[in-house]
Amino acid sequence: MTTADTAMRTGRMRVPRTRGALSGTLLILLGVWGAIIPFVGPYFDFAYTPDNAWTWTAARGWLDVLPGVVVALAGLVMLMSVNRIVACTASWFAIAGGAWFVIGLPLAPFMGLNIGLPTASSTGMRALEALAYFYALGAVILFLASAALGRLSVHSVSDWRAAERRAADERAMAAPAAAPAATTAMPAGAATTGTAPADGREDEDVVARENARRAIAREQNDHAHRHFLRMRRGSRERDREQVSASGDRPPQ
């Protein structure tokens, strides 16, 4: 594989930070919300029992803190990473965290976890607490992470053009370094076998093609020049024949 091919493959794995910036930022905020709301919700009478601020329970750790931290870290990676594979992997972790927010509460009894009950008195507020803590939060995270995964996994036209520019820059930087090596003496083993070293073989092929093109151009120019000279000699001979036929003295 040549250096240009390697640069193209590496360039296609790069992704602009702006591609996942908005989704990453929102996922960080949602992850922090999901992880911290059980501990600060009691300050606003918006909580599950036990309605004491900063009270740790196993249910809060498994159903709130764990998925919230995973989503927040995944959003941070998506925000900072320029590698397509890393960013897509972070998106999958965010999807898993969002899915756990949605399905964690119904699975809690089977895991021996007691998340408690909403502390609101009205039915509407209890439904809002369930949505804000789990179901709606997980659904929004799933939507954002899935949309980010789609954007990060697609090779757009701008990505291809950026990869081509980076590959061209790599070739431009490699060419001056390869030029002095081409002028050095060939190793003894390469001279006896008639093969060039593996390093710089691509540059030698480029030089050979350029020399062949110039040789063909010189041959075409020589052929055209010889044809012109033949035509000119033939024209002079015809002029002499016409002068001889008319009895005049041929021109000097």
Image (cartoon, rainbow, N blue to C red):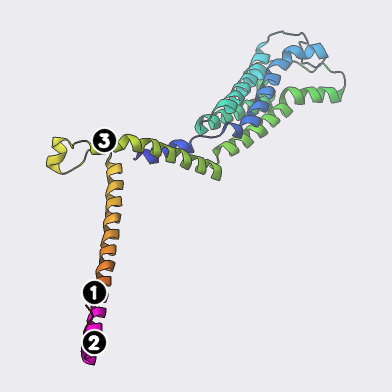
Label 2 amino acid? Val
Q: Is residue 149 in sight in this rendering?
A: yes
Q: Is residue 156 in sight in this rendering?
A: no
Give the magenta part as a residue range: 230-248
- Quarter of image, res 169: top left
The crowd level at tag 2 (other Cα within 10 Å; few <14, some 14-19, many 20+) is some
Judge left or right: residue 215 versus residue 27.
left
Q: Position of residue 236 (x, y in %)?
A: 24, 79
For disc 2, the marked residue is: 243
Measure how far apart labels 1 and 2 are at the Cα level.
20 Å
N-term-proximal mark, 2 vs 3: 3
Q: Residue at x 53, y 41 (%)?
A: 159
Q: Position of residue 175 (x, y in %)?
A: 35, 38
Look at the picture and state if 33 lies above or below 250. above
Measure how far apart labels 2 and 3 are at the Cα level.
64 Å
Label 1 amino acid? Arg
For disc 1, the marked residue is: 230
